[in-house]
Image: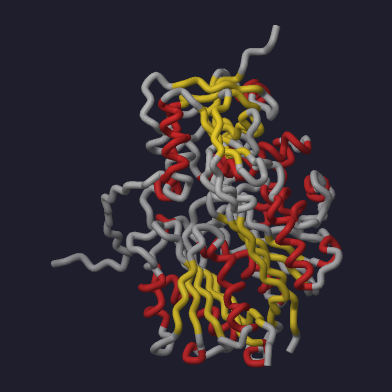
Amino acid sequence: MSETSTAALIHDVRWEIDYRVRLGRAWSRFMRGLRDRKLLASTCDHCDRTYLPPQSYCEACYEPITRWQECEPVGTLRTATIVYQGFDGGPQAPYAVGAIEIDGTHSLLMHFVGGVDLSDVDAARKALRGGVRVRAVWADERTAAITDIAHFAVAPAQP
Amino acid sequence: MRDHAVIAGVGFTEATSPRRQELSKNELCRLAVDRALEHAGCDRRDIDVVIIGDIAGFEASSVAARTIAPALGLPPYTTVLPICTGGTTGGHLPNQAAALIRAGFAQRVLCVAPNTFDGPVDLQAVINTNSPMVMEQPLGMGAVHMGAFFPAAYQERYGVTDADFELLATKNRENADHNPFAHVTSALSAEHAARMVSTPLRLGMVCPVSSGAIALVVGAESVVGGQAGHPVARITAAQSISDGYLGGKRRDFSTFEVVEVMARRAYREAQVVDPRSEFDVVELFNPYAPMEFMLMEAFGLCPYGGAPELLRKGVTRYGGDLPVNLSGGIQCTNPGVAGQISPVAHIATQLMGQATARQVEGARRGLAHSTGGTFFQFHTATVLERVDL
């Protein structure tokens, strides 16, 4: 005899779907630059705003952008968070992520921040305050992806 | 004749953890709709348009509005408008209803905010599809980590302490104790609440994943106003604003700059001159508790950096003259699109004198805010005023 129950049934539904995303001209050029250890920004012909990540048009004045330049991969950390609880499939916590203003640009580049001991949360938070100078550390294996930069390392304090 | 849009009926379902939810999405929405229609004294056959919120990719099938709409018992051929902004969808529903009513396109609009966070087995994996793929998504940033950038910058700029954030989160959980539709309450253990997730956010400052639905009946004031048998909430401002897509477009994470612009538009529309003294009750979207401080400041309720002091003085608590998030806010209950509409729903019931949580006596005017999307790309503001008919 079958069991009679009013408890809600739950069925599993699973999709396995892969996507292909076209990066477009500006981001393709940017990512290929990273593979060659070059950090490329684009500057609006009209208002002189410099974007990194680069864009082929200006979000501020909507003019097309044709000027490109290579930036020294150094900048200033504006804000950071130290992740103690990550997510499945993500990096192993703890790790730090920051918003970095590359010198000479008018946007922020989000990236991993390294070179700081994260085991002591209070000390790590002090070390990752806004205004700290950082420099890109290139990944050994580069595939024209944002992770061709392994992280931005906090510059050692000047003697 | 152009008419005001009013919220005449509000329907909540009890919020639970997704594990404990026994109703299907359609059943849950139907329950919220039945309650909203009954509250408004409105017959479902009189509904002109139904607006249903959706978050693309958060369901096992695309555009859940297609399956929900036929389950609501509405007249054949009712116009169905799915709205999906990928963030703050719920906040857009009453604002869109107000636009349709003010334009004379509809007289009675049903807004349905479904539970949208309880379908995915791994919600974080789905939320990650919402983060800027290719450029920022590979960098270990889930929703909570993106949310952490704002309080981290705010704290640094204004010298706000972790203790201020914890005091705020505790205030909201105590408010949720009085809200029968809340999910997390002060029953949350102190040890649990203190666990660091992503600096400066601790677990007690971060919203849960909840299951629940909310529906509203929004109508033309001259048509539905007298039918409800209770005061209704006139929508005197309905605004929205958007920010850049990439996180790096924010430039400054220490303030919600676009909210200040939106607030000025909303106050002009609703003829609010001094928001600090003119609002009796406020609900601000706070999936991460510290956002409440930042939003109070962006909405001009106090000077920048001044919100923690208002909390410490008791101004924003129950009994203070500017109570904020008496529902406990999103920090305590977050059922997705239903969470996004909840600030409007809670303010509406406050103005009707039928608050879901503790009632502010004589509340006449309230502010409801919602936000969402990657790095809070979208915001909405709704100003509501009590109308006795």
Answer left or right for A113 relative to B122.
right
Say above or below: B288 vs B301. Answer: above
Q: Which residue lies furthest to the top in this view?
A: A159
Above or below, B171 against B102 in this view is above
Q: Can residue B201 be spotted in the picture?
A: no
Q: Is residue B273 above or below residue B124?
A: below
- For the point 51% across and 91% down, the residue is B46
Image coordinates of residue B219 in percent, x first then y, are 61, 84
Q: How many marks?
A: 0
* Residue A23 seen in render: yes
Q: Position of residue B211 (x, y in %)?
A: 47, 60
Residue at the spot x=80%, y=60% of the render? B322
Which one is nearer the viewer's eye here, B13 or B123? B123
Colour scheme in the image?
secondary structure
User: Residue B247 lies in what quarter of the image?
Assistant: top right
Horizontal arrangement in the rendering, residue B71 relative to residue B329 (left or right): left
The quarter of the rendered structure image containing the N terminus of chain B is bottom right
Considering depth in this image, is A100 or A61 the residue closer to the camera? A61
Q: In which quarter of the image is the C terminus of chain B?
A: bottom right
x then y, percent, for residue B168: 71, 47
**Residue B280 vertical placement versus B233 (above, below):** above
Q: Position of residue B184 (x, y in %)?
A: 56, 53
* Front residue (pair B44, B15): B44
Q: Which residue is drawn at 64% across and 64% down?
A: B240
Q: Residue at x 63, y 92 (%)?
A: B223
Is B8 positioned to the left or the right of B282 in the image? left
